[in-house]
Amino acid sequence: MKSDGYLVKPLKSTQEINDLLSAIDTMTFAKRNRFLFLLGINTGLQASDLVRMHVSDILYSSAPIVFEETTRRPRQLHLEAIQAQIKTYTQGMAPSYWLFPSRKRNKQGYVDHIKVRAVYQMFQVLAKLTDRQDLGTQTMRKTYGYFYYLRTKNLANLQQQFNQSTAAYTLQYIDWQVEDEAKSQALDLGL
């Protein structure tokens, strides 16, 4: 959970999410980075799983099944809330294209997907732009987990999604605090 000497935490409000989106919009490759962030906070996938996705993985279904790289387990995504963003982002992209293409080509001369290192660098830039020391590639996954638990209170399901060994660790991972309990009564993510 630590990255370069600091603790990566989830974003815990729509204001924090919107602040990060505003910062992303000022960056090079803003369209790609914005969609990567939105997909990350809406799926809870690891950055390594996000960067390996093809357009076809999310284009034809609002509830696609993907296979996670680390566990090799299938995971059903629920993308109903971001269908408009998916259509806008993928417009003009062939189904076989990488969802998050790199500007670099691989050894065979083909366009490759961005690497996790690029996502890490994106979050380092975002940390500077927003004057935060708690951002990293796990920010998207932790934010998803935080809002998932805030909305559903289904800790067992979240623990299973994250493939974590204990419920206590899952609560620690999403930085769940006693004061967060009150927020769950009036949740409106609005994204």
Image: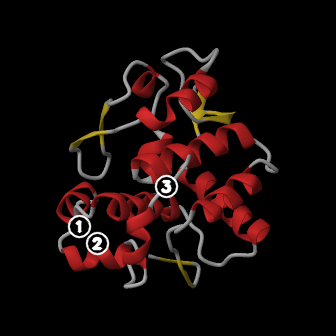
Check the picture and name the quadrant holding the N terminus: bottom left
Q: Quarter of the image holding residue 36? A: top right
Does the CB distance between marks 3 and 2 fall below 8 Å?
no
Residue that label 2 marks: 170
Residue 186 coordinates in the image, percent (x, y):
44, 64
Which of 14/160 is in front? 14
Tag 3, which secondary structure? loop
Residue that label 3 marks: 188
- Residue at x-position 50% and y-position 29%: 83
Does the CB distance between marks 1 and 3 fall below 8 Å?
no
- Residue at x-position 63% and y-position 65%: 16
Left or right: 82 as drawn, with respect to 176: right
- What is the spatial separation of the Cα atoms under label 3 and label 2, in whole angstroms? 23 Å
Does the CB distance between marks 1 and 2 fall below 8 Å?
yes
Amino acid type for the residue under numbered disc 3:
Asp
Which of 179/57 is in front? 179
Residue that label 1 marks: 164
Q: Quarter of the image holding residue 133? A: bottom right
| Numbered disc in front, either 1 or 2 | 2
Left or right: 149 as drawn, with respect to 180: left
- What is the spatial separation of the Cα atoms under label 1 and label 3, in whole angstroms? 27 Å
Looking at the image, tell me whether mark 1 or mark 3 is earlier in sequence order.
1
- Residue at x-position 44% and y-position 71%: 183
Residue 112, above or below 45: above
